[in-house]
Amino acid sequence: MNQVQELFNLHDRVAIVTGGAGLLGQRHSEALAEAGASIVVADLLADQAQKAAQELQQRFGIPAIGIGTDVTQAASVEAMVKNVKDEFGRIDILINNAAMTVKSGTERVRGYFAPFENYPENLWRTALETGLTGAFLCSQHVGRVMVHQDRGVIVNISSTYGLVGPDQRIYADSKNPYDPELSLNTPAAYAVVKSGIIGLTRYLATYWAGKNIRVNTLTPGGVFDGHDETFVRNYSSRTVVGRMAQPDEYKGALLFLASDASSYMTGANLVVDGGWTAW
């Protein structure tokens, strides 16, 4: 193995991916597994977490476990970390990917896409608890392990809307894939959570200065997930490359941040948005 390949090699690492059974969470797990890491899929849906872990084992031949975890609850996060320590003896990488999601046919959908003036307080709180408090709790409990090891890497997942205000114009005339009766938009809670993630990254990077723990942010752009043609066209027109991302296109950036290839990088934000924020 040459020197460059060795920089990306994770064969001796144990990685936790929160929200690991979701669209991008699965891709993050795949990227780390392909590099040889042992994977912990931590997700609120225990069955899906375990299924995702089994698929990783079968596809990449690496150790993987799925653990049902509610990142908003300290006791659940603490139990997950203990489980990982008991299973693998260490934790080298944490990907804070968990966020509040909506699914077709759920009551949450209507509230999630409500206009700001009528946005439900309970969903605002749920979004912040999942995306920010969850990242805080996971970083806190995993961080204790990393401090003891004198080694660790944390990657927090943000969004272009953590850097710039959402362009609500791109949703004009687009069908909502979750409920065709609702207009499509990006809620304030999402933008606030993703902005806060960047601040948490900078705080933790400087707080753990000298502890050999690196903390960085990955900021992806929009990923195609069955959107209608109008939305895809509107979104694509705002990017320099002229299209939405495919789910696999963040694997390289994620692996870079999680591996020794980024060993001189901490407190930073790697933006991979097709040029959205370059205009």
Image: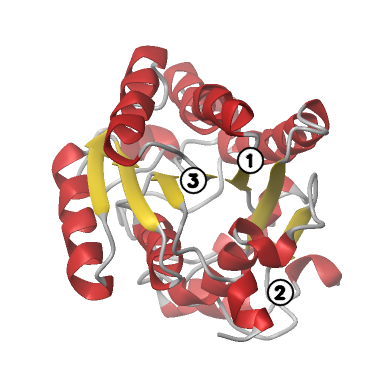
What separation in Å lies between label 2 and label 3 (alpha carbons)?
Answer: 25 Å
For the residue pair 242 and 156, the one nearer the viewer reads as: 156
Disc 2 packing (10 Å; few <14; some 14–19; many ≥20): some
Disc with the residue nearer the chain's start (1 vs 3): 3
Which quadrant is home to the N terminus? bottom right
The kind of secondary structure element at disc 2 is: loop
Q: Residues within 10 Å of mark 3 (few under 14, many from 20)?
A: many
Provide the residue designation for mark 2: 238
Q: Alpha-carbon neighbours of circle 1 within 10 Å: few (<14), some, or many (≥20)?
A: some
Which sits earlier in the primary sequence, circle 2 or circle 3? 3
Residue drawn at 69 percent across, 76 percent down: 274
Give the left or right position of residue 278, taking residue 43 as reference. Answer: right
How many angstroms separate mark 1 from mark 2 (CA)? 40 Å
Picture layout, residue 3 above or below residue 219: below
Q: Are marks 2 and 3 in contact (CB under 8 Å)?
A: no
Q: How far apart are marks 1 and 3 (CA)?
A: 20 Å
Horizontal side, residue 68 vs residue 269: left or right? left
The one nearer the camera, 120 or 271, is 271
User: Can you give x and y, in whole percent of width and height, for residue 184 in the image?
Assistant: 47, 54
Q: Identify the residue at image location x=38%, y=16%.
A: 73
Q: Earlier in the sequence, mark 1 or mark 2?
A: 1
The image quadrant that residue 148 belongs to is top right
User: Disc 2 vs disc 3: which is toward the camera?
Assistant: 3
> Would you say residue 160 is visible in this rendering?
yes
Tell me, for residue 151, which label it has, or none.
1
The residue lying at 53 percent from left, 70 percent from top is 9
Q: Which mark is residue 75?
A: none
Residue 79 position in % (x across, y down): 31, 21
Q: What residue type is labelled 3?
A: Asn
The residue at which mark 3 appears reads as 97
Type of amino acid at the residue the image marks with label 2: Arg
The reply to whether the C-beta atoms of the residues labelled 1 and 3 are less than 8 Å apart is: no
